[in-house]
Amino acid sequence: MATATDYYALLGVPRNATEEQIRSAYRKLARQYHPDANQESGSAEKFKQITEAYEVLSDPERRQRYDMFGSGQGGLGDFGIGDLFETFFGTEFRRREARGPMRGADLRMEIEIDLLDAVKGGDRTIRVPRLETCAKCEGTGAEPGSEITTCATCGGRGEVRQVQQSVFGRFVNVATCPRCGGAGKTVDRLCTRCRGEGRERKEHDLELTIPPGIDDGQQLRVAGEGEAGLRGGPSGDLYVLIRIKDHPLFRREGDDLVHVLRISPAQAALGDELTVPTIDGAEATVRVPGGAQHGQMVRLRGKGVPHLGSNGRGDQLVYLDVAVPRSLTKDQRALYKRLRDLEGTPEQIDDARGMFDRIRDAIGGE
């Protein structure tokens, strides 16, 4: 028997099957195993499996991921079983729509923070526009003081059923009650504030905790801070995407911070002891070794970004930029001429790869 992840075997098609072959195989199996047409044990599970297989293999992008990784990449997704049957067979296969308490939608938003905030972490107030439980009716959708009664159309079930006869046999349509919207209750006066929905749009100020070491493109989840649920359902979650602004002095590489220190040819040749800024605001001492080369790196340990969720920090990588002066004073020109006569022409090398590596490091690894 085919496993649940062997979608080609579930539909009985070869791995190089065309879209039409996949669609045709699914239609045949769906008629056979639909729960309203087949009451045998296991038919509902089989129907679910072949539907999942069709949704993956009929989508070129999801099919390609499945062929590469052998995963359904999310199962049935947003396109439900009822939607498929309405497409192929008409409205007699409409799915049972949700009723009763419903979870609120998740929200996603993006914020931009400074590099220093990403390093230190801390709290930040953000404003979240969302649907919240109506303060006037407390989510009931009824005007305070109005009468709430059991829906006469569905008898409080929140759904209506209709039996139909088709070529496949007897089918029962189940749909959300059009009168009460699935709540099972009706009111004589709707809430004037939310117009009966039970929710209203507001802007909510939320204190967001940013952990030290968070990186650009990472996402924070705040449970229960999404939109309010319907009919007493729980709220969704809030997902906050972090974007980090460029810094004028530092560039982040993982948990390391890159800084470029400009030095003169004399400092490179003789060596020197200089100070550089750090992301914490203090200064650190850098010892430039004699004979330093353009693009050479000096490491300051523990001066980088904290490791997210653990102890320790990255390093600050100081790259030396040997700056050749564009213009010279009369005295400088005389000294450089004297130095040129003493040094002569540098020895040429056949393998320039080392030089290219230094140039690449000096311009930022691009």
Image (cartoon, helix red, strand yellow):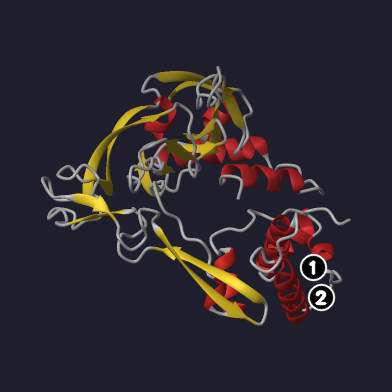
For marks 2 and 1, give the one nearer the viewer: 1
| In the image, residue 201 above or below residue 207 | below
Q: Is residue 284 left or right of residue 271?
A: left
Q: Residue drawn at (84%, 63%), measured in percent from left and top?
A: 9
The reply to whether the C-beta atoms of the residues labelled 2 and 1 are less than 8 Å apart is yes
Few, some or many C-alpha atoms within 10 Å of disc 1 (few <14, some 14-19, many ≥20)?
A: many
- The image quadrant of residue 92 is bottom right
- Total residue callouts: 2
Q: Is residue 279 visible?
A: no
- The image quadrant of residue 84 is bottom right
| In the image, residue 125 above or below residue 307 | below
Report the Cα–Cα distance between label 2 and label 1: 10 Å
Residue picked out by circle 2: 17
Few, some or many C-alpha atoms within 10 Å of disc 2 (few <14, some 14-19, many ≥20)?
A: few
Q: Is residue 181 visible?
A: yes
Residue picked out by circle 1: 11
Q: Is residue 27 left or right of residue 179?
A: right
- The image quadrant of residue 70 is bottom right
Measured as percent of width and height from the top left, residue 264 is found at: 49, 34
| In the image, residue 255 above or below residue 218 | above
